[in-house]
């Protein structure tokens, strides 16, 4: 979290990125300051060649 609360990061770790996102999706989508957030789902360790899905959260 930035000292002025203008920016922050939220990480979740587990065996299935899609399932983790499904658990928090409803809460994130009801939180207005998450508009425009960059969401990255990584299906494996942070290394080259690992499948990633990323999108900008649009609450409209």
Image: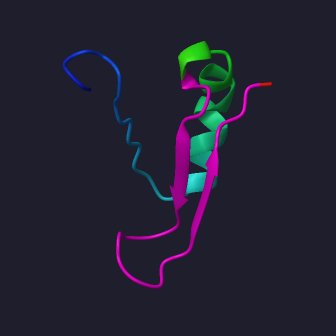
Which of the colour schemes (rainbow, by chain, secondary structure, one colour) is used? Answer: rainbow
The residue at the far bottom in this view is 49
Q: Depth check: give the residue in front, 4 or 9.
A: 4
Q: Quadrant of residue 30?
A: top right
Quadrant where the N terminus sits is: top left
Q: Depth check: give the residue in front, 21 or 57.
A: 57
| Extent of the magenta region | 34-59
Q: Quadrant of residue 58?
A: top right
Residue 42 highlighted magenta (yes or no): yes
Position of 8 with respect to 25 (left or right) is: left
Residue 22 highlighted magenta (yes or no): no
Task: Indicate the position of residue 40 as horizontal and vertical percent values.
Answer: 52, 53
Residue at left 35%, top 21%?
6
The residue at the far right in this view is 60
The residue at the far left in this view is 3
Q: Measured along the vertical axis of the image, is residue 2 above or below residue 57? A: above
Q: Measured along the vertical axis of the image, is residue 43 above or below residue 48? A: above
- The tally of labels here is 0
Position of 35 with respect to 47 (left or right) is: right
Q: Measured along the vertical axis of the image, is residue 10 above or below residue 16? A: above
Residue at left 48%, top 59%?
15
Q: Measured along the vertical axis of the image, is residue 31 above or below residue 45? A: above
Task: Indicate the position of residue 21 as horizontal and vertical percent values.
Answer: 60, 42
Residue at left 39%, top 49%?
13
Task: Indicate the position of residue 11 as horizontal and vertical percent values.
Answer: 38, 42
Q: Quadrant of residue 25?
A: top right
Task: Indicate the position of residue 44 as horizontal and vertical percent values.
Answer: 45, 70
Quadrant where the C terminus sits is: top right
């Amino acid at each position: 979290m930035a000292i002025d609360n203008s920016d922050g990061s939220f990480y979740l770790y587990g065996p299935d990125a899609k399932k983790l996102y499904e658990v928090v999706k409803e809460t994130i989508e009801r939180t207005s300051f998450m508009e425009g957030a960059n969401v990255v789902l990584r299906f494996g360790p942070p290394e080259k060649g690992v499948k990633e899905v990323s999108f900008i959260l649009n609450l409209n």
